[in-house]
Amino acid sequence: MNIITVINAKGGCGKSTIAMNVASGLARYGHRVLLMDLDPQAQVTQWLAAGDGLSSEGTLVAALLRRQTLSNVIQPSGFERLSFVASADGLEDLGREISHTEGYQSMLTQLLAEEHIADRFDFIVIDSPNQISPIMENAIYPADAFIVPFESTKAVKSYASIYKLLLKLRPEGDFHLLHVLSNLTRLLGQRKRVLQLMSTDGITPARSEIRSCGWLAQVDENGGSIFHYRPHSNGARDMAALVEEVRELFVNGPSAQPETEDAPGSAPETDGIEVSALSA
Ligand SMILES: Nc1ncnc2c1ncn2[C@@H]1O[C@H](COP(=O)(O)OP(=O)(O)O)[C@@H](O)[C@H]1O
Ligand SMILES: [Mg+2]
C-alpha cells in the first residue's frame, strides 16, 4: 500500500481538488483507494456529502479519540473502489489536545497499522489542512509521496516551512515529491513568477500541471470527481496525467488503461472557462 499526502501551508492552492481527483483517478485504474480528509474544514467530506462537518461521530475524530475503530468510520464514497474517511470540525481542537502527548505525530500511522488497513487498499490519499498543525504532522508521518500544489508565489514561499517539517519528521528523506503547478494558466505572468521562484529555490516542477479549468472549479458541487462530471475536459486530462505520474512512482510495468469508456483525451470538450474569464 502506498500513501500519498497532498500538502502545502497555503489555503486555495488546489490541495482538496487534487486529493479528491487523484483518489478517484487511481480508483478508475482498478486500484482500491482510501481517501482520508485530514482537513478540519472538511471540504472533501462536504463534496462527497459524507458528513455535516460538525458531528464527530463516524469521522476520523472518533477514530483518533478511540471512540470508534478506523474500520468503523471507513465509508463508501459512491464511486467504485473508492472508500472514504470523513473529517469534522473537532479535528482542530483534537490537534491541539494531542500535541501534549508523546509521539502524537504517529497516531494515524498507528491506527493504520493496528487495523491492517494496508491489506485492504492499494493507495491511501490524504487531504491535509491549510496550516502546520499536529494534524498535518499526522498526514506527513506515514506518507510515501507528497503532492505539493503551487498556485502563487506565496505557495512557493510557504513550502519552505513544510519542507523543513518533512525533513524533521522524516529525516531519512524516504519519500517522493511531486511539485505541481495548479490553476495558473489564466495568469501567465504569475505562472512565470512562480516558476522563477521555484527555480531559485531549487524546486523541480513535476511533469504534470493542473491547468485552470472552469469545470474543476465547479466539480465540488457535482460529486467531486472530474472524471465523472466532465471526463473530456482539460481538468480530467491533467488529473489523469498526474495520476499516471503517481502510478509511475509505485506501479511497475506498462500502464493499464483506466476502466471506463470515458477515457480522458478521447474527445475534446470545452474547458468550462467563461469567455469573460479568458479575456480578463
Ligand atoms: N485547476 C483549477 N482550475 C480552476 N479552479 C480551481 C483549480 N484548482 C482548484 N480550483 C478552485 O480553487 C479553489 C481552491 O481549491 P482547493 O482545492 O479548495 O484548495 P485548497 O484545498 O488548497 O484550499 C476552489 O474553489 C477550487 O474549485
Ligand atoms: Mg482544502
Image (cartoon, grey):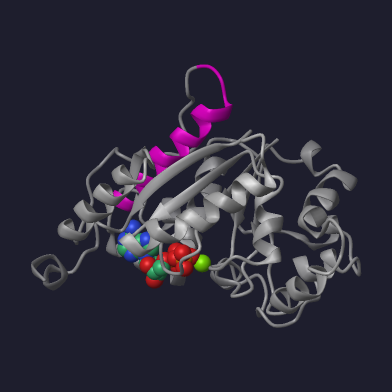
- Can residue 276 be seen here? The reply is yes
Q: Is residue 226 magenta?
A: no
The magenta span reads: 234-253
Q: Nearer the viewer, residue 113 or 84?
A: 113
Residue at image position (69%, 48%) is 169
Horizontal and vertical percent for residue 130? 53, 68
Q: Nearer the viewer, residue 109 or 228?
A: 109
In the rendered view, tell whether residue 240 sits above or below residue 16: above
Horizontal and vertical percent for residue 167? 61, 45
Give the main secondary structure, helix, strand or loop, of the magenta stretch.
Answer: helix
Residue at image position (36%, 46%) is 201
Q: Residue furthest bottom?
A: 54
Query: Position of 223 compared to 124: left or right?
Result: left
In which quadrant of the rendered image does the N terminus lie?
Answer: top right
Horizontal and vertical percent for residue 68? 89, 66
Query: Position of 146 compared to 229: left or right?
Result: right
Horizontal and vertical percent for residue 159? 46, 55
- Can residue 152 be seen here? The reply is no
Residue at image position (45%, 61%) is 158
Residue at image position (42%, 41%) is 242
In which quadrant of the rendered image does the C terminus lie?
Answer: bottom left
In the rendered view, tell whether residue 39 sits above or below residue 197: below
Q: Residue furthest left?
A: 279
Snapshot quadrant of residue 182: bottom left
Query: Position of 133 compared to 204: left or right?
Result: right
